[in-house]
Amino acid sequence: MQIKGVIFDIGGVLYVGDSVIDGAIEAIKKIKSKYKVRFLTNTTRRAPKSVLKRLNSFGFEVSEDELFTALNATRDYIIKNRGSAYLILTNEAKEYFKDLESNNPSYVVVGDAYTNFNYENLNRGFRALMNGAKLIAAAKNRYFKDSDNQLSLDAGGFVEALEFASNQKAKIIGKPSKEFFNLALSSLNLEPKEVLMVGDDIQNDILGAKEAGLNTALVKTGKFQESDLKKDIKPDFILDSVVDLLDIIF
């Protein structure tokens, strides 16, 4: 295995809540000195610029062209298809899509809407779907490690509720979508076999990356559960934290 580039998930890998993983800043800096690096995230509560600002406030020194978020990929998809949207998102994320909102949408977009997950918003989305709109899951994560170090609901359960009620399957834009991984690969100008994906989500990060042809490393931080290791998904490496990646690629 000859690695030339590394793709990192961010939440749960670089930080949890407001706490940076011990040694992660120094580890990423060292890795960037030798390898091409990209950051690929399903984070949908915050707009891309806010995600970038947060990473840099922690000290990770990430540039705009190194970051790929499920929200900017979703926005690009809607624009490419000349669509409009009804949004089940946080207020901040909705602002990012403001010019694409419509009373007669072609898409219903669901991300981690946090407190905007309520009956009224979900029912409006359901009605739009029944009137012909297509369902988009910016991301379909089950849960994430919250700032109190406990697991919290992500968008996945709400996406499935709309899938069940409307009898249609959502198009998933973020991980584990192969197209999403390919955006980062294209930016790196590398072959999948030359890239290592580092994540804390056995399904979206590890299985998604493996299906896209990448090498994989699962970290035991963030949403990782010991039960993940009993699933029929085998990462190439299992690390206590992202810091241990240095022992593998240096």
Image (cartoon, rainbow, N blue to C red):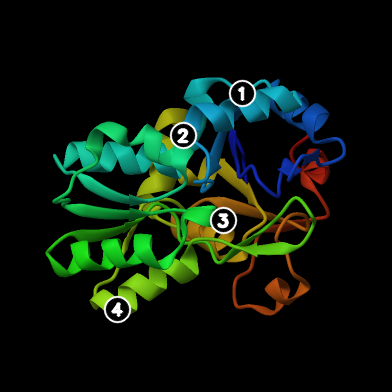
| Mark closer to the chain start, 3 or 1 | 1
Determine whether the residue tagged by mark 3 lies in a helix, strand or loop: helix
Q: Which residue is mark 2?
A: 190
How much space separates mark 4 and mark 2, taking CA atoms? Answer: 41 Å
Tell whether label 1 touches label 3 (CB within 8 Å).
no
Q: Which residue is mark 4?
A: 165
Determine whether the residue tagged by mark 4 lies in a helix, strand or loop: helix
Tell whether label 3 touches label 2 (CB within 8 Å).
no
User: In the orientation shown, which residue stands out farthest toward the front?
Assistant: 120
Tell whether label 2 touches label 4 (CB within 8 Å).
no
Q: Is residue 230 visible?
A: yes
**What residue type is disc 2 on?**
Leu
How much space separates mark 1 and mark 4, taking CA atoms? Answer: 40 Å
**What residue type is disc 4 on?**
Ala
How much space separates mark 2 and mark 1, taking CA atoms? Answer: 19 Å
- Residue at the spot x=55%, y=65% of the render? 203
Q: Nearer the viewer, residue 86 or 184?
A: 86
Relative height, residue 176 to residue 83 (above, below): below
